[in-house]
Image: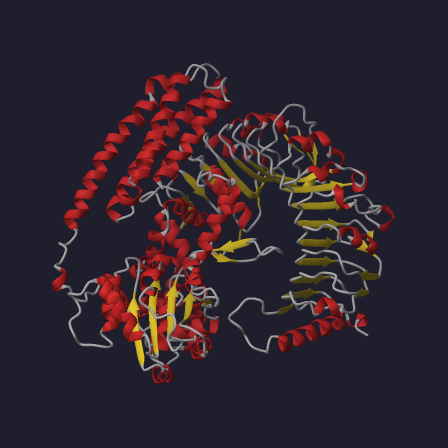
Amino acid sequence: MAEAAVTFLLENVQKLLVEQADLISGAEKELNDLQDELGLLKAFLMDYEETRKKGQVFTQFERHIREAVYEAEDILDACLTHKAKYGGCIFNLKHLDLAKKAKELRPQLQSIFDRAIRLREELLPPIADPSAATLGTSDDDKFKKTQREDNVVGFADEEATLIKYLNEETDQLDVISIVGMPGLGKTTLARKIYRNPKIQLEFPTLIWVYVSQKLKVREVFLTILQKFTHDDMSSKEDLVLKELVRSHLDKERFLLFVDDLWTIEDWKLIEAALPKNNKLGKVLITSRHMGVAAQTNSTRKPHALRFLTFEESWELLQLEVFGKNNTGPKELEGLGMQIARQCGGVPLPVVVIGGTLVEKSGDHHEKSDWEKISNSVSSSVHGDKRTESIISLSYDQLPHHLRDCFLYLGMFPEDTEIPALKLKHLWIAEGFIQQKEGKSVEEVAEDNLDDLVSRNLVMVGRTKANGDIKTCRVHDMIREFCLNEASFAKKNLFQEVKKTQGVFHPAITEIEKRRRLCIHSNVTEFLLKKPKGPKVRSFVCFSKETIDLPPDYTLSIPDTFDLLRVVDATPLKFTKFPPKLTKLIHLRYIALSGSEFKALPEAVSKLWNLQTVKIDTALREFEIKVDISKMKQLRHLKTKAAIKLKEVRGGGGENLQTLSRLMAECCKEELFNRASNLKNLGIRGNLNALVNATYLGKLEYLEKLKLVHDVLPSTADNALHRVPDPPSFPPNLRMLTLSSTYLGWDNMTRLGNLHNLQVLKLKEMAFKGTLWQAQGGGFPQLETLHIERTELEIWTASAEPFPKLKNLILKNCEKLQQIPYVVGKGESLQLVDIESVSQTLVRSAKKIEVEKQQMQGGEVRATRGRFKLKISPAYASSSTTN
């Protein structure tokens, strides 16, 4: 994590030297020296990477490095801010000599690391003589053995599914895996299966091995051999033990439980001793890591353990507090249900809270104790050592480049659906994402999110039509861990500002020491206190409620925090764009909202670091007075209003990836020649001018295009004349959205010739007419078809019009009578999602569901591809169903 901070500062210095000659005039030598020293410091840290992974003894040294880099960063940025505001040379740099400070760091750190290594070696026990080796029990083993296994609620369906897998006949050794987030009950479920009488009868040999983070493969082999012999095997070499394990298991009907597998490398060491050709053998693995579990068996998908239902959580809480056959006092039922619901379907916090209630009340349960717990479930759970220990195991296993990304999730409020795109852009702006060869920073950020999901630390909320993550979230107990680990006392990564009992925490006077702030309530009162944050780099507010800021508060954020990099405050409704924001030259990310935002002022062009601008305004047009070609770092410019763009004159614009939504009249060939790397483009206005244009066809990297035909009044009389010819569309277009275009259904034939198109969304009367006769031979790659708000009544299809269609989404199609048979029977179709449609269409969809179940044998399968019908409760009126 420290090297990420060093890398971020190093990149900033490099950009200064290349792009800001005027700003750094007089300090070039100092900055070149600083660049050299930071490069050497980064190399030093990379050399010590493996050493630093070996224990908590290095944690304090990580903080030492981070604080030293922060200090250098603050000095440099403060000097640049002074220069930008008042002119003159950067006089501070020569006196403070940052390069000298960086140079002095390396020998200090060398001494620190050497001392830490010696200390760790002194703390390690002596290596035992192999001849005297015996099976030991680690602290993790002891922890596992103290877990309660009697109070098991739910999992009956999960147990039945897994037992069915265990009873299936296979051609070779079969591996089944259970995956899920920390505390979800993977081991509890595996233990339940281990103790199941039918399993004990079916498998004469049951073996349980516990892996955890530090695999001792020798002990795994010795544990397995104990099932077959009482001979002392401790003196034998590992290779001999491996062969003995294989020979004993070769013809045996056995079930091996491998609990808490962390890496695929660990699995390969264990797998090497297993007889692959023994089709009587089974292996059941528990793991937190989806990617690891998936690699243990390429033919069987890992079994993702579900969350407890509310009813199961409440039952488990009653069991933990009152014991079997006792539901407790009636007066506590409401509070108990409230507590159970807050545990989010994870057994661990239910068990922890249950233990806390028993400890506080014993046999005499006071309502006041339950009220206190119900008001602080998350903090109560996190205060338990078991919870922290379990999550710490996952956190400690994270590679260093993922740790800040993970902890940053604590910035968002409880129970928040986090937009994945926003999260990735924030990670980039905060400096958490390091460039990798052959990948954009956005692609690296996406890989990081996928990795955290795979490790079951982040849960997927909604997905996009193409399967990518649209929103994500974290469980409350994991969020509490992030908040604690990121706190000032530990890493000073960020600080949540909260008001409790009339007092802000941290105190207003403490804000000056914090690095990043998140505040989700009492914002205006906080700003009224006029906090000073000379070191604060991020100010974010993700309140679920809209907060109207009085005009006097327009200047409060830029006046309070001079060195801001990130301002994300869309819940705060500004009366106008804060003019002083243009003085914060370190800004990389701006997300603001205001009902009367009319323009992005020209002075924003001074923000040479700016990467992302997101504006929420109620107006139909939004003027960009900035010449975006001068903003070398700008990557994403987004608003729902029609962007009136200043004519592009100079070079630049090559980094721009998102431009949405651009006024149709501003679509010029000159603009797209410069912004040739666009990936996401939205256009709003009169689209008829684009029908014969060819410049969009030159955007070879454009993947997503949204076209909104915004002509008042929006009627069929003002329709888009026709769809552009296929060569006029970007060649690699994957997602196309049309809205308010009022096209005739015959235009679908043209769209069918977009051979790379995977997602097509037709919204707000994109097409007019009551009849659509879909023809086969088009849309060869289309996977998702979304139709919303249409007057369509009859939809027919010949041949197979969408050969790869997976998802069909129909919303507010009240007159449509049925889904064509050839569409419904498509082999690729996995989802039909309908909302606000006629009951005849509902019956048509249910008929497809029955036929799909018959095709799939009517069973829940472990493999991908099972059909799902999703029906929202809103139907059209009965008058449309005859």
Quarter in which the N terminus is drawn: top left
Q: Quadrant of residue 599?
A: top right
The answer to whether residue 54 is left or right of residue 133 is right
Q: How many marks?
A: 0
Residue extending furthest toward the right:
717
Q: Position of residue 475 (x, y in %)?
A: 44, 58
Above or below residue 128? Residue 630 is: above
Depth check, front residue: 223 or 20: 223
Quadrant of image for the C terminus: bottom right
Return the x and y of residue 783 as percentages of the image width and height. Answer: 66, 58
Q: Position of residue 270 (x, y in %)?
A: 32, 64
> Is there any visible trace of residue 417 in the rendered image?
no
Above or below 197: residue 571: above
- Colour scheme employed for the rendering of this structure: secondary structure
Quadrant of the image occupied by residue 745: bottom right
- Identified at 76% across, 68% down, the residue is 820
Q: Position of residue 609 (x, y in %)?
A: 52, 30
Q: Nearer the viewer, residue 81 or 64?
A: 64
Q: Name the residue located 31 percent from the left edge and 42 percent from the top edge.
A: 49
Q: Quadrant of residue 705?
A: top right
Asked if 495 appears above or below 210 in the picture, the reply is above
In front of the other: 544 or 802: 802
Is residue 862 left or right of 742 when viewed as pictured?
left
Q: Is residue 732 left or right of residue 59?
A: right
